[in-house]
């Protein structure tokens, strides 16, 4: 391996180490606790080394969010059901479970301020992949409705549920009922279009 290749590999490893440390710190203490000073201490590099990888905390949160969307896309793909099962339900359950198990990561992806260009031609592939999995789950109940708009409604509903559950704003005993109502409403629209 050439010196240049080794340096590139080491730089990529440092880059990932910073992202992982930010995620760990956010999961344990929240995003307010993630500072370049604390990250530098955690990864045992100086702050200038951190700044050679990221312009600041916002850039780190952005990198965490993009990687998180890639993880969500893989999880949604893995959750695709076998024949006879509802793909919409499987996607909804996987999405909500992801948000529940990784609250700080979910927060970075969908709550924290970010300069990620959502809904533009510059959107990172990981975001397209995650949204594409939701589109694929919604497609069977589409009917005559706009597929992307319907997917945005589905995603918005899941996000609302995830965020309110995370903030302890909803009754835990009604999780299944809420999901049934959401999925029923999406499926009902499909039948109404056919009338």
Image (cartoon, helix red, strand yellow):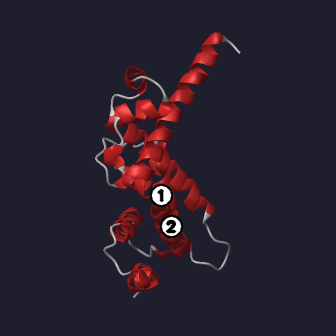
Which residue was labeled with disc 2? 97
| Spatial CA span between label 1 and label 2 | 8 Å
The mark lying in front, picked from 1 and 2, is: 1
Asked if residue 119 is positioned above or below residue 151 in the image, the reply reads: above
Proximity of marks 1 and 2: CB atoms separated by less than 8 Å: no
Q: Residue at x 61, y 66 (%)?
A: 80
> On the rendered image, what quadrant is the N terminus found in?
top right
Secondary structure of residue under mark 1: loop
Residue 90 lies left or right of residue 65; in this view the side is right
Disc on the earlier residue, 1 or 2: 2
Q: Residue pushed farthest bottom?
A: 195
Residue 173, x across and y down, in percent: 43, 85
Residue 178, x across and y down, in percent: 40, 82
Asked if residue 166 is positioned above or below residue 72 in the image, the reply reads: below
Q: Residue at x 36, y 81 (%)?
A: 171
Residue 102, numbered circle: 1
Residue 186 lies left or right of residue 58; in this view the side is right
Q: Is residue 143 visible?
A: yes
Residue 22, x across and y down, in percent: 43, 41
Asked if residue 97 is positioned above or below residue 68 in the image, the reply reads: below
Residue 183 lies left or right of residue 84; in this view the side is left
Q: Residues within 10 Å of mark 2 (few under 14, many from 20)?
A: some
Q: Is residue 122 visible?
A: no
């Amino acid at each position: 391996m050439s010196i240049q290749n080794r340096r590139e590999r080491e730089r990529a490893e440092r880059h990932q180490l910073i992202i992982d440390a930010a995620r760990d710190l956010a999961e344990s203490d929240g995003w307010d606790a993630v500072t370049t000073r604390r990250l530098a201490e955690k990864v045992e590099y100086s702050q200038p080394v951190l700044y050679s990888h990221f312009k600041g905390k916002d850039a780190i949160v952005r990198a965490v969010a993009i990687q998180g969307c890639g993880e969500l896309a893989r999880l949604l793909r893995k959750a695709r059901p076998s024949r006879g099962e509802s793909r919409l339900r499987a996607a909804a359950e996987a999405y909500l479970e992801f948000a529940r198990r990784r609250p700080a990561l979910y927060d970075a992806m969908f709550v924290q301020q970010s300069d990620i260009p959502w809904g533009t031609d510059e959107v990172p592939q990981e975001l397209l992949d995650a949204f594409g999995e939701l589109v694929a789950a919604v497609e069977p109940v589409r009917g005559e409705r706009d597929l992307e708009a319907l997917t945005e409604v589905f995603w918005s509903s899941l996000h609302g549920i995830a965020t309110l559950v995370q903030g302890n704003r909803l009754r835990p005993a009604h999780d299944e009922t809420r999901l049934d109502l959401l999925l029923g409403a999406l499926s009902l629209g499909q039948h109404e279009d056919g009338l």
